[in-house]
Image (spheres, rainbow, N blue to C red):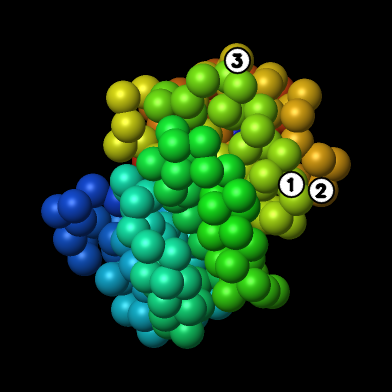
Amino acid sequence: MDNKEILKHVDHTVLKAFTSWDDIKKLCDEAVELNTASVCIPPTYIKRINDTYGNKINICTVIGFPLGYSVVEAKIAEAKKAIEDGANEIDMVINICDVKNGDFDKVFDEIKAIRKATEGKVLKVIIETCYLTDDEKIKLCKIVTDAKADYIKTSTGFGTNGATIEDIKLFKANIGSDVKMKAAGGIRTKEAMEEYLNEGCDRIGSSSASILK
């Protein structure tokens, strides 16, 4: 797989708490040069990126990030504001507390509510696999499918572990045909990106797109 093909599937990412505008501008300039799928950035920078780059950049952002336990009303407000400011793709973190309490109906209701708030935009659901059992992951594959999200995503990159090929194989066996997969967290080499894409991922979240220049 050549570099250009891989880059078409990369969400070029910077989400550190201390991310500066210089960091964002470098990321965006690289994304334009490399033609990445998107830039995935903190919500606070959406409007400035949109004002600066316009339609040269596809903006992805995160809500309920990175811990997921904000109330659903706050996540909905975040999502609506992100779209208003110019985001086209929303990566939401589920409420992992609800998963651990076995409140899967609440998880479904939250994703469904955010799906409604983001209608017409891409919704990716981060389930943070490092904190979950395989049984919980399988249940979440069904929930993400039934809630009609566009993607299931492995990780925030802020947990105890990131993406694994084993989790992608588990996703692939349990998601619906309309749900795509995004792997994120610890993917820093061309070989790793290619491996995840060959396993069936449609997107890769990585801060390392520039290695493919």
Circle 3 or circle 1, nearest the eye: 1
Q: Mark 3 points at which residue?
A: 166
Task: Give above or below for 134 relative to 157.
Answer: above
Numbered badge on residue 145: 1
Q: Residue at x 64, y 72 (%)?
A: 116
CA gap between label 1 and label 2 equals: 8 Å
The answer to which of marks 3 and 1 sits earlier in the sequence is 1
Q: Is mark 2 on a helix, strand or loop?
A: loop
Q: Would you call the spot at circle 2 few (<14 residues within 10 Å), some (14-19), or many (20 or more)?
A: few
Q: Which residue, given by chain and number where applicable, does mark 2 sit on?
A: 178
Residue 28 visible to the viewer = no
Residue 103 located left or right of residue 17: right
**Is there a contact, CB below 8 Å, between mark 1 and mark 2?**
yes
- Residue type at tag 3: Glu
Q: Is mark 3 on a helix, strand or loop?
A: helix
The part of the image, by quadrant, that contains residue 111 is bottom right
- What crowding class fits label 1: few (fewer than 14 Cα within 10 Å), some (14-19), or many (20 or more)? many
- Location of residue 211 (image quadrant): top left
Q: Is residue 203 above or below residue 88?
A: above
Q: Which of marks 1 and 2 is nearer the N terminus?
A: 1
Residue positioned 45% across, 44% down in the render: 98
Question: Whole-percent x and y of residue 12?
Answer: 45, 48
At a point 59% along the width and 28% down the height, the residue shown is: 137
Q: Residue at x 60, y 59 (%)?
A: 109
